[in-house]
Amino acid sequence: MNSTVKSIPAKDTSLFKYFGTWQATDEGDPCAMVSYWTAAYVEFDFTGDSVTLLFSQPSSFRLQIDNGQYMEAWSANGQYTVSACGKGKHTLRISSQSRRNHIYFAGVATGEECSVSRTCDKPHYIQFIGDSISETPLSFSHRSADILGWDYSVIACSAISLVRNRGYWRTANGWYWESTKGNCWHEGTIADRLYKNFGCLSIGMEDAFFKLGIPSYPSNGVSDIKDDPEFEDLAQNYFTPKYDFNFATGNTPDIVFIFLGTNDLTLDDPMPMCDAFVESYMQFVSKILDIYGKNTKICIMQGLTGGRGEPISLDSARISSILRAAKALMHEYPDNVCYIDHETVASWGTEISEDKTHPSPKGYDTLTHEVAKYLAEHFDTRA
């Protein structure tokens, strides 16, 4: 770079706004910021017709200029130049593509005619916590936030439960049940590593939310995690401080939207399981409020079905347990917790797909607009 080019490091949070899980965990460049989980993004304003993004490692990401369409991009050599229309002021967002994808953002390089500044604050920053229904690109989560013009992040994982040792995440990562042996693990899998190292069958969101992601098989479908060093290390060290998230990084959401329970309970689970779920839910929300502060609003949403595609009903262990947790939390934190009850969710008429669990594409559209409407009515204070 010549003398007319200046570099601005990624850790300058007076200029760069981070949403979601970002942390300086790149050992090759401790000044870089690394993204984790789904829908983590960084944004800033710049003047001029171009700006060069800097990366400490090869990174794939999505790029958005001036609220336009997202474009997929890739940097193999540590730099990526973004060209804008005209020399005016532009807003640039760099977003992760999935929770398995990291952005190794090192900062930007600008010329003499280009300046960088912090973007204006949106009305709200909402963080969604959930499972596959919240994680999918079709989800109500980020789409409802986009409708409202709010900032957002998504901490979600397909098949995950709230409570450790439940849900379907473990099945996808090496656990299986055998009638003669009981709980079993395929040798070399994530479930095998977790059980040998930490004595647990699987990870719940009560663990994962406070960590840098979650070990899951990468999309190339490798059969043993030793074939992927990152996932091997996650499984070996997950319940150690190495993968703790430092919540001092980035912005703090003023609204946290929790949609969990689908992978914890079904129609007729026994009372001890329901009691444990309610207790974990209360501890989970309490920890979030301790970290984010007592001004944070928590929005709890009821399930879409009672289980196995059954209608929403208080006869379902799942629905009644979420209700119990919500009522207890609203009693303990009356100024913080609100609840989208089973009657409201049922009235939306969200179409469920043939798998009897997830919304259909039409159902996701319904859910997106109903959630956006609810959030606007309860939290949007603009005239």
Image: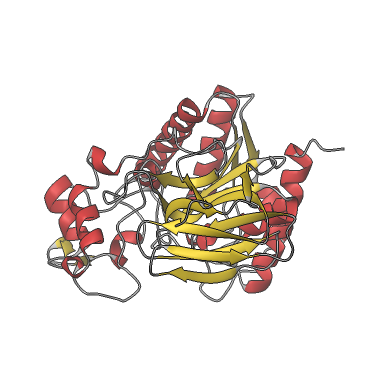
Q: Position of residue 155 (x, y in %)?
A: 47, 50
> Which residue is at the far front?
3
User: 339 or 67: nearer the eye?
Assistant: 67
User: 5 or 17: nearer the eye?
Assistant: 5
In which quadrant of the rendered image does the C terminus lie?
Answer: top right
In which quadrant of the rendered image does the N terminus lie?
Answer: bottom left
Q: Is residue 247 left or right of residue 323?
A: left
Residue at 34% of width from left, 43% of height from top?
A: 207
Residue 374 in view in this figure? yes
Name above or below for residue 178 compared with residue 252.
Answer: below
Residue at 49% of width from left, 42% of height from top?
A: 321
Residue at 60% of width from left, 25% of height from top?
A: 295
Quarter of image, res 263: bottom left
Q: Position of residue 130 (x, y in %)?
A: 49, 52
Q: Position of residue 250 (x, y in %)?
A: 50, 39
Quarter of image, res 239: top left
Name above or below for residue 3 compared with residue 207.
Answer: below
Residue 268 in view in this figure? no
Q: Is residue 41 left or right of residue 84?
A: left
Residue at 55% of width from left, 44% of height from top?
A: 16
User: 144 or 37: nearer the eye?
Assistant: 37
How is the protein colored in the picture? secondary structure
Number of marks: 0
Q: Is residue 381 left or right of residue 106?
A: right
Q: Position of residue 20 (x, y in %)?
A: 50, 47
